[in-house]
Every structure is written in structure tokens, then in C-alpha cells.
Image (cartoon, rainbow, N blue to C red):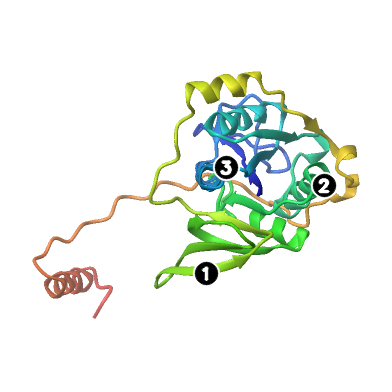
Amino acid sequence: MKIVVCVKQVPDTSDIKWTENNTMVREGVESIMNPFDEYAVETAIRIKEANPSATITAVSMGPPQAKDVLKRAIAMGADEAILISDKKFAGADTQATSRTLAAAIKNKIGNVDLIICGMFAIDGDTAQTGPSIAEHLGLAQVTYAKEVQYSGGDNLVVKREVDEGLQTVQMQLPGLVCMLKCDYEPRKPSIKGTMKANKTEIPMYGLEDIGLTPEEVGIKGSPTFVSKAFRPQPRESGEMINAGSAQEAAQKLIEKLQAEKILA
């Protein structure tokens, strides 16, 4: 089984800076692996542990410093990694990002059985990149996944979060899964894994290597435009209503709303 895990380097700071195009400044900023992507890596490793012949390739698009999160993925248990990096990729929205990642997977890795992504990125929170990769590659997809089980064959069993609780679905491979935070925590890099990561050479590919044109990537390839970016003002904390029962709490809430003249 050939698994690809998409990981993203995100800022580990509250001091976010923006470019004149309202895109985030990433160069020279302390960064971490996107937390949702850590669950994607953990899920891939668990599948490999149950199926030892599986291989895991971590993929990231970003500046050269994004190699750090790829080395972390290897230290956690991935077999190899590739970095997609080119100044022409800067300012990409989710459409351009997913197109670039899909092209890299298709042209530099080849046929894969499973792609695993984090459902969200904490620096954007759009939940669009993973599903868009699946669309570009013509793959089946399952989103909001909490657990993935694979025991051989052409099907994958996924437990996903829905409004009513958890839903169990079966997906035919090849396909893509987007992970939420799971009930288990991602493992920490081991000493042996860290030593392997430090020795592993991570190839870096640019625009000319993945078969796209300048008009398809970065700002030029992005149909969306950020007109304004700002930090929301913190809101005051709410008031907790302590009551012995739901009925009593509801009555106290009604009285407070009436006192504020929100309810008549």
C-alpha cells in the first residue's frame, strides 16, 4: 500500500504579519507542523503498523524551511518526504495550493493508494485543500474522519464525525481522507526516528518539475482574493449559569434575558 500524507508548516506565534497582498508572511517565522496534520501522520503510521508492506511519503508545499515539518513526519514514522517549493507558489489560495500538490503527487510520486490530509489548517481553517486535491486527481474522498481502518484489499473503513454523532463508511481505494483530531494523540518522534530524519535527504521540486505553468500556481493561479486581513478583537467571557437541572437553568436564563430586556 502506497500512502501519501500532506503536511503543512504553520506559524507558531501570535505575531502574525501580512504582505501587501494580504497573504501571511512565512519566511523567518517560528513554525510547527499543523496539529491536524499530525493526526494524519499518526493515522498513516497506524495503517502501516497493521500492514508492514505499506510505505508512507510525506509531502509539503512551502518555503525551504518547511523541510523541518517533513523531517518531523519522518521522525514520527514516515519513510520518505518531498518538498514542493518555488517562489512562484507564493500567495496561493486553496485552489492553487491543491492544484500544485495534486500535480506533485501525480508527477513525482505516481500512483498512490491513499492520501491523508488534516481536515483544517490552523492558519487558514478553510477545510478546502484536501477535498480539492481529491477532485484534481479524480479520487474518492471522506472528510471529517476520526478513525481509519485498513486490513487489505481495495476498501477502507472510516469513522467520520457528523451532526448526529459518528458515521461509519466504506471507501474504495484509491482515495483521500481528511482527518479531524482523533481520540488518540499523535506519537512523539523517537530517538531512532529523529536520527533517521537527520540523515534523510529531502528532495525539493519547483514549478518546472511538476508540469504546471506560472498561470496555474501562486497568486496568478488563485481565483480568490483576500481584500482584508485582521485580528478579531477578543470578546468578554460569558456568564455561566449554575443550576440543579436543565429546567432550572432554562428558567434562570429566561429571567436574565428578561432583565436585560432581550425577552419581553
Q: CA distance from mark 2 to mark 1?
A: 34 Å
- The image shows residue 123, relative to residue 74, as above or below, that is below
Q: Position of residue 16 (x, y in %)?
A: 56, 35
Which is more foreground, mark 2 or mark 3?
Answer: 3
- Mark 3 = which residue? 52
Image quarter (top left, top right, bottom left or bottom right) of the C terminus: bottom left
Do tag 1 and tag 3 residues touch (Cβ < 8 Å)? no
- Mark 1 = which residue? 169
Inspect the image, locate mark 2, and give the three-letter code of the amino acid beneath it: Val
Which is more foreground, mark 2 or mark 1?
Answer: 1
Q: Label 2: state its secondary structure.
A: loop
Q: Position of residue 197 (x, y in %)?
A: 61, 24
- Mark 2 = which residue? 217
Q: Label 3: state its secondary structure.
A: loop
Q: Quadrant of residue 167?
A: bottom left
Q: Is residue 81 left or right of residue 245?
A: right
Which is more foreground, mark 1 or mark 3?
Answer: 3
Q: First in sequence: mark 1 or mark 3?
A: 3
Q: Look at the image and tell me whether residue 179 can be seen.
A: yes
Q: First in sequence: mark 2 or mark 1?
A: 1
Q: Residue at x 18, y 73 (%)?
A: 250
Q: Label 1: state its secondary structure.
A: strand
Inspect the image, locate mark 1, and give the three-letter code of the amino acid beneath it: Val
Inspect the image, locate mark 3, and give the three-letter code of the amino acid beneath it: Pro
Is 62 or 49 nearer to us in this picture?
A: 49
